[in-house]
Image (tube, helix red, strand yellow):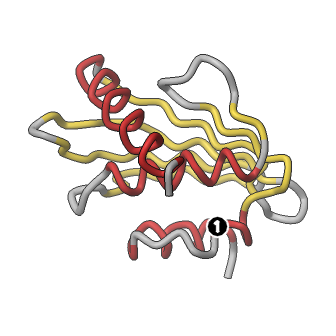
Amino acid sequence: METLEIWHDMVRRRDLARLDEILAEDCVFISPIVHTSQQGRELTRLYLTGAVNVFNDSFQYTKEIVAPQYAVLEFTCDVDGIVVNGVDIMTFDDADKIVEFKVMVRPLKAVNLMHEKMQAMLDKLATQ
C-alpha cells in the first residue's frame, strides 16, 4: 500500500496507528497556527494526532492533486458551526515517506477556532 493510500485509510478510520510507517524520521510539520516548523517524527505525530481528534466525522477531502513527490489534498470540515477549508501539502522522499507535512487553513474564523481547539488538544495529549 502506498503512503497516500495508508494516509487516506487512517483518516477514514480516524486511527493513526500506522503513522510511523509513512513519516520519515526527520519529517517537518508546518502548521497554520504555529509560526515555526515542528521538526521530527514525534512532533509531526503529535500535531497530526491532535488534528484527527479536533476534526469530526464531517471531515472530508474534496480535491486531490498528486505528483511523484508531492500531494495536495483539499479538505472541508464543520467544527462548531464554522466551515473549515484547508489543504494538506505532503512532500515525499525517494522511499515514499512523508518528509514535510504542511497544513493551510481558511477563513480567519476557522484559523482562530483551530488555534483554540488544537491548543487544548495538544495540552491534553501532552498529559497522557
In the image, residue 89 above or below residue 55: above
The residue shown at (72%, 42%) is 100
Apparent side of residue 94 relative to residue 85 in the rendered image (left or right): right
Element under disc 1: helix
Identity, as a three-letter code, of the amino acid under mark 1: Leu
Determine the image quadrant of residue 47: top right
Coordinates of residue 59 in the picture (x, y in percent)? 29, 55
Coordinates of residue 55 in the picture (x, y in percent)? 31, 51
Q: Nearer the viewer, residue 45 or 30?
A: 45
User: Could you classify mark 1 by the number of other residues whose Cα lies within 10 Å: few (under 14), some (14-19), or many (20 or more)?
Assistant: some
| Outermost residue toward the right in this view | 94
The residue shown at (49%, 49%) is 73
The residue shown at (45%, 40%) is 123
Residue placed under numbered mark 1 in the picture: 19
Q: Nearer the viewer, residue 29 or 42?
A: 42
Coordinates of residue 61 in the picture (x, y in percent)? 37, 55
| Outermost residue toward the left in this view | 81
| Outermost residue toward the bottom in this view | 1
